[in-house]
Image: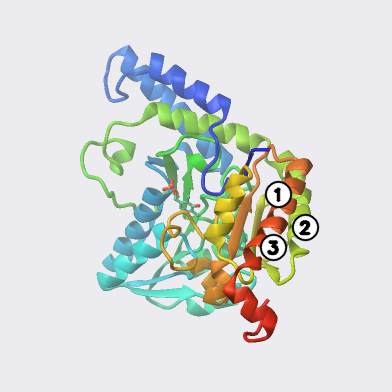
Amino acid sequence: MKIYADNAATTKMSPAAIRAMMSCLEETYGNPSSLYALGQEAKETLEKARAAIAAVINAEPQEIIITSGGSEADNQALRSAALAGKKKGKTHLISTAFEHHAVLHTLKKLEDEGFAVTLLPVHENGLVRLEEVAAAIREDTCLVSVMTANNEIGTVQPIGEIGALCREKGVTFHTDAVQAVGHLPLDVKAQQIDMLSASAHKFHGPKGVGFLYVRKGVPLTNLIEGGAQERGKRAGTENVAAAVSMAAALKETAGSMAETEARLRPLRDRLIAGLGEIPHSALNGDAVHRLPGNVNFCFEGIEGESLLLLLDDRGICASSGSACTSGSLDPSHVLLAIGRVHDVAHGSLRLTLGEDATEEQVDYIIQNVKEVVEYLRSFSPIWRDLTSGKAAFIL
Ligand SMILES: *Cc1c(COP(=O)(O)O)cnc(C)c1O
């Protein structure tokens, strides 16, 4: 059996997204800035895509900036809020300890440039507490950035409540919604979101394209100087085919969101129950407030990397830590943020189910993870120390 269970890393492009891209590449190849009909046709196609994207999150089309993906959107959102704040003498930024590196590394840069950063704890359940967000806001706070759903443990934050709090306090609110757009209902007006980042390849669109929603009136700085594309906020000839493909993917994925969620939740919970039968294991992150397809476990006494390789041999694509940290020996900053100690964090496994997952596949995953964990433990020196009483179990 072949099972792709790494949909948080990337998703397969949908047929509709591929068709939209192909037709655009073949026929609508003009430059949207050109005045002749072919160029204007490309511009119209691009603007239609922008409107379709905006509609999914209840934004206005002119509030959508097409970017090269989620990382660029995060960078631009944070830099824009920091610069706008600085002009008013506000140089304090608030975020959380388990954001994506696109946010955390930008914050680190901003800190080096003189900004003050507060990273809120996310506790054992992987959730921020509203009262802690409120307590962290100071006179000089210019931005709160809290991700909608975490890419490793899938926990979903109270975005509407944080949005309302920030609006009341007059602080700009950004959310990295890369894991949520197309998968969870989002409404930038109702949830009072000022800026939101998304990436097409997380909802069956192409890689290398995403968008930043910026509420009308919220100041935006460009990262790339040049022509006047994207309201002058993101220079460079527009990648019309990618934008159109992203819109097609988003319309489709978001359109079947409710059915997908209803189908995936029971499969996810079946997977959680099955893996929970493995001795000395634990689910990472809240069991309820999590993405419908996300399962993340720690197994004591093994290395996540070995687990992944053996699962790959059995046809299962999964992940341990995030793609950006795998290859290094540092355990995931997300698992450390929810209080897992290094040894335990090393034995982690993330399985993220796609829309087409089946019960048969889930049972196959459970069976194989059980076998592989048992096999790895059979010659693990850490496991031997644990079972002989030389070291104490944590899980
Ligand atoms: C994938 C991801 C990103 C980065 O998006 P890219 O389009 O790959 O740059 C940012 N944040 C989160 C939460 C992600 O899952």
Left or right, residue 112 beside residue 11: left
Mark with earlier residue (2, 1): 2
Q: Secondary structure at mark 2?
A: helix
User: Percent from the top left, x then y, of residue 76?
Assistant: 35, 53
Q: Nearer the viewer, mark 3 or mark 1?
A: 3
Task: In this rendered view, identify the residue nearer to me: 384 or 47.
Answer: 384
Residue 298 in sight in this render: no
> Which residue is at 49% across, 40% downward?
201
Give the Cα separation between the discs numbered 3 and 2.
14 Å
Q: Which mark is residue 374?
A: 3
Q: Secondary structure at mark 3?
A: helix
Task: In this rendered view, identify the residue nearer to me: 155 or 186.
Answer: 155
Residue placed furthest toward the left = 226
* Label 2, residues with CA under 10 Å away: few <14, some 14-19, many ≥20: some
Task: Give the quarter of the figure containing the N terminus.
Answer: top right
Mark with earlier residue (3, 2): 2
Task: In this rendered view, identify the residue nearer to me: 371 or 206.
Answer: 371
Q: Secondary structure at mark 1?
A: helix
The image shows a total of numbered marks equal to 3
Residue placed furthest toward the bottom = 390
Dot 1 corresponds to which residue? 365
